[in-house]
Structure formats: C-alpha cells, structure tokens
Image (cartoon, grey):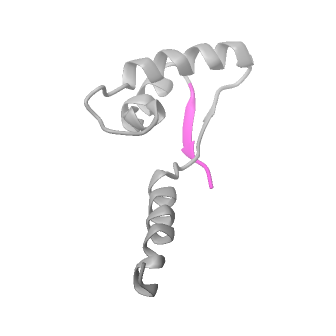
Amino acid sequence: MTPRWRSVPAGLAVVLLVGCAEREWIYEKKNVTPTRYDRDMAICRQEALDPKAFALFASGRVNRDMLNRCMERKGYAVRRGK
C-alpha cells in the first residue's frame, strides 16, 4: 500500500462510527416503574420499526419520530439528551 492509501481504512472507520452514533433521547414519566418503561419502550420500538430501512443493527431501523410520538401518547415527556 502506498502511504496515501494507508489512512483510508482508519478514515472510513471514523466516518462509520460517527455516522452510527445515535443521539440520546430521554423519556420521563412520573411514577413509572422500570418494568412499565421497558414494556412501553418495546411496544413503541416495534410500532416504529421500519423494515425497509438499511442499518447494521435493528435500532438503526427505528423511525425516531414515530417512536417519540408513541411514547408521548403513553404519557412520557420526550426530550433530547446531550
């Protein structure tokens, strides 16, 4: 490999990692138990799953807007984390 091409794999890895990084979302609901939260999240993820979307992981095939609307319908306050 020529010196110029040696940095290409590293550059691609960085681009892929940054592209796959997902923003954190926070779902808050007063007096919700962890079990109830997990159940609500599982239901909403299933509802928001887009089987036509391409992603390496199933979490990447979730339509975030649909997921957030579903959680809001269930009484959660939805906001972006850091």
Give the residue drawn at x 38%, y 33%: 61
Residue at (39, 19) in percent of width and height: 47
Is residue 27 part of the magenta span, yes or no? Answer: no
Residue with the most extreme left position: 52
User: Residue at coordinates 62% horizontally, 55% vertically from top-left?
Assistant: 82
Left or right of 65? Residue 23 is right
> Which residue occupies the extreme bottom position in the image?
3
Residue 11: x and y in percent read 47, 71
Picture coordinates of residue 48 (x, y %)?
38, 25
- Boundaries of the magenta span: 76-82
Vertical side of 43 occupied by 70: above or below: below
Q: Is residue 38 above or below residue 62?
A: above
Q: Residue 58's spot in the image, x, y percent?
A: 45, 30
Q: Is residue 78 magenta?
A: yes
The residue nearer to you, when weighing 62 against 82, is: 62
| Residue plotted at (46% across, 23% down) | 45
